[in-house]
């Protein structure tokens, strides 16, 4: 998700610089007023962290666990801040979610499952947003060449379709983690052992 967001951000930044000119971008930064910072932060919190907290809540509800949105919002904000201090994104923050959910007396298997599903859904949302941005650029960026518009349009339409196909595939199969575990069981001839069966069920 971070790589996709970074790539999308860099692409949009390059396009904006090409359309507006580097000097105008610098002037806009110099003329930025701190009074616009508070509304921007409020909107960012409402559209990202609160939306993500609600998404996580629905994932937990599907597992029969009910945690307040405010609590999940606090956890999301804490993990978001921690991710900036870890060498690799999500290495430090995501396991912390499991530890925090333990305070709500949620079993670790359910906590891990909710974190994995929540992040996977989040990545899907990021891909769809990237597709919408590319389509919007086709109709708003008048200075883009026809070839670039064609590429953006194809990519913009393909990304949401790709997300839908991946979700449909995962719904009909056991999923990548279970598939890898089964393959390991066959290779190591441990698939019939009681301990391996117990791990597979979990």
Image (spheres, helix red, strand yellow):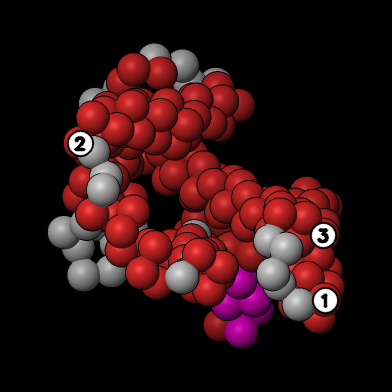
Residue 88 % position (x, y)? 28, 69
Task: Tell me the residue at 26%/35% (across/down).
Answer: 37
- Quadrant of residue 53 in the image? top left
| 17 and 56: which is toward the camera | 17
Using the image, determine if residue 25 lies above or below residue 61: below
Task: Tell me the residue at 27%/45% (across/down).
Answer: 32
Residue beneath disc 1: 146
Q: Name the main secondary structure of what is drawn in magenta.
A: helix
Q: Earlier in the sequence, mark 3 or mark 1?
A: 1
Using the image, determine if residue 7 lies above or below residue 38: below
Q: Residues within 10 Å of mark 1 (few under 14, many from 20)?
A: few
Secondary structure beneath label 3 = helix
Circle number at residue 34: 2
Residue 149, visible in the rendered structure: yes
Which of label 3 and label 2 is nearer to you?
Answer: 2
Residue beneath disc 3: 157
Q: CA distance from mark 1 to mark 2?
A: 39 Å
| 125 and 194: which is toward the camera | 125
Residue interval drawn in magenta: 179-187
Question: 190 left or right of 40?
Answer: right
Furthest toward the left, the residue is 85
The verdict on residue 71 being magenta is: no
Secondary structure beneath label 2 = helix
Q: Residues within 10 Å of mark 2 (few under 14, many from 20)?
A: few
Q: CA distance from mark 3 to mark 2?
A: 37 Å
Secondary structure beneath label 1 = helix
Q: Earlier in the sequence, mark 1 or mark 2?
A: 2
Q: Are marks 1 and 2 in contact (CB under 8 Å)?
A: no
């Amino acid at each position: 998700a971070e790589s996709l967001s970074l790539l999308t951000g860099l692409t949009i930044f390059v396009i904006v610089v090409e359309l507006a000119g580097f000097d105008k971008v610098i002037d806009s930064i110099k003329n930025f007023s701190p009074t616009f910072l508070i509304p921007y932060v409020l909107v960012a919190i409402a559209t990202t962290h609160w939306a993500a907290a609600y998404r996580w809540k629905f994932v937990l509800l599907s597992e029969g666990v009910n945690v307040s949105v405010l609590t999940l919002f606090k956890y999301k904000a804490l993990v978001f801040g921690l991710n900036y201090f870890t060498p690799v994104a999500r290495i430090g923050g995501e396991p912390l979610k499991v530890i925090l959910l333990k305070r709500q007396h949620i079993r670790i298997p359910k906590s891990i499952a909710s974190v994995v599903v929540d992040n996977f859904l989040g990545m899907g949302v990021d891909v769809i947003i990237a597709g919408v941005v590319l389509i919007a650029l086709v109709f708003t960026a008048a200075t883009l060449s026809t070839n670039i518009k064609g590429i953006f349009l194809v990519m913009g339409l393909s990304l949401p379709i790709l997300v839908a196909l991946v979700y449909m595939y995962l719904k009909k199969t056991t999923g990548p983690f279970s598939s890898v575990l089964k393959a390991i069981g066959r290779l190591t001839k441990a698939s019939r052992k009681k301990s391996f069966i117990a791990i597979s069920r979990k």
